[in-house]
Amino acid sequence: MAALQGQANIPSTALPAASSLTVARVKAAANQRVRVQGYGFYFDGTSNSAVPVQIRIGRIATDITSPSSLTITPNEEELTETFQTSAAQSPAHASEPVYGNILKTITVHPQLGYEYLAPLGQEIILKGGGMLGFEATAQAAVDVRGYVMFEE
């Protein structure tokens, strides 16, 4: 890894009620490993008694055919290298990717957010061509926004 660090911005995305949506997916280039350093998800719910949103973080075994690309921004804007890593999300009402290993499941109140910054040496490593997905399921309609931070 050459310390090219970037962030994929997750724009405000409506979560369908009682359905899952992959709000972010990071995919490593074929022969390049990626270190996922952190992520954050923030919700705009209005009910203080709403059921928490579930977020599953896992390795994707089979991707969908036409994911919507997410913008990747370098942490240092003077760097001119091109990212080989791609980031995307599932379009609403499309099929979802097939998940293999689920690494973590968290629940977040829909009026709050959740942020995780991995301690040094404990980042999630993606093998070349590997994918990591962030799937959110809300019982009531709510919007999510956030980011995924990585290094290649």
Image (tube, helix red, strand yellow):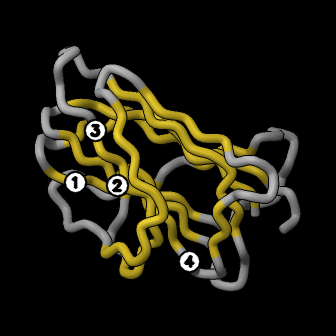
Whole-percent x and y of residue 108?
36, 34
Q: Which residue is mark 3?
A: 53
Q: Residue at x 17, y 19 (%)?
A: 49
Q: Dot 1: what SS?
A: strand
Distance from the alpha carbon under mark 3 to that under mark 1:
10 Å
Relative placement, left or right, of 7 versus 93 is right
Distance from the alpha carbon under mark 2 to that under mark 4:
16 Å
Nearer the N terminus, badge 2 or badge 4? 4
Q: Which residue is mark 1?
A: 20
Q: Quick one: label 2, few (<14), some, or many (20+) residues within 10 Å? A: many
| Three-letter code for the amino acid on which mark 3 is drawn | Val
Nearer the N terminus, badge 3 or badge 4? 3
Q: Residue at x 24, y 47 (%)?
A: 137
Q: Dot 3: what SS?
A: strand
Whole-percent x and y of residue 152?
76, 63
Distance from the alpha carbon under mark 3 to that under mark 4:
26 Å
Is 35 above or below relative to 126? above
Q: Which residue is mark 4?
A: 130
Q: Residue at x 36, y 80 (%)?
A: 62
| Three-letter code for the amino acid on which mark 4 is drawn | Gly
Distance from the alpha carbon under mark 3 to that under mark 2:
10 Å
Is 73 above or below relative to 30? above
Distance from the alpha carbon under mark 2 to that under mark 1:
6 Å
* Snapshot quadrant of residue 101: bottom left
Nearer the N terminus, badge 2 or badge 1? 1
Q: Which residue is mark 2?
A: 135
Q: Which one is in front in this view, the residue at disc 3 or the one at disc 2?
A: 3
Nearer the N terminus, badge 3 or badge 1? 1
Distance from the alpha carbon under mark 4 to that under mark 1:
21 Å
Cβ atoms under marks 2 and 1 closer than 8 Å: yes
* Snapshot quadrant of residue 99: bottom left
| Three-letter code for the amino acid on which mark 1 is drawn | Ser
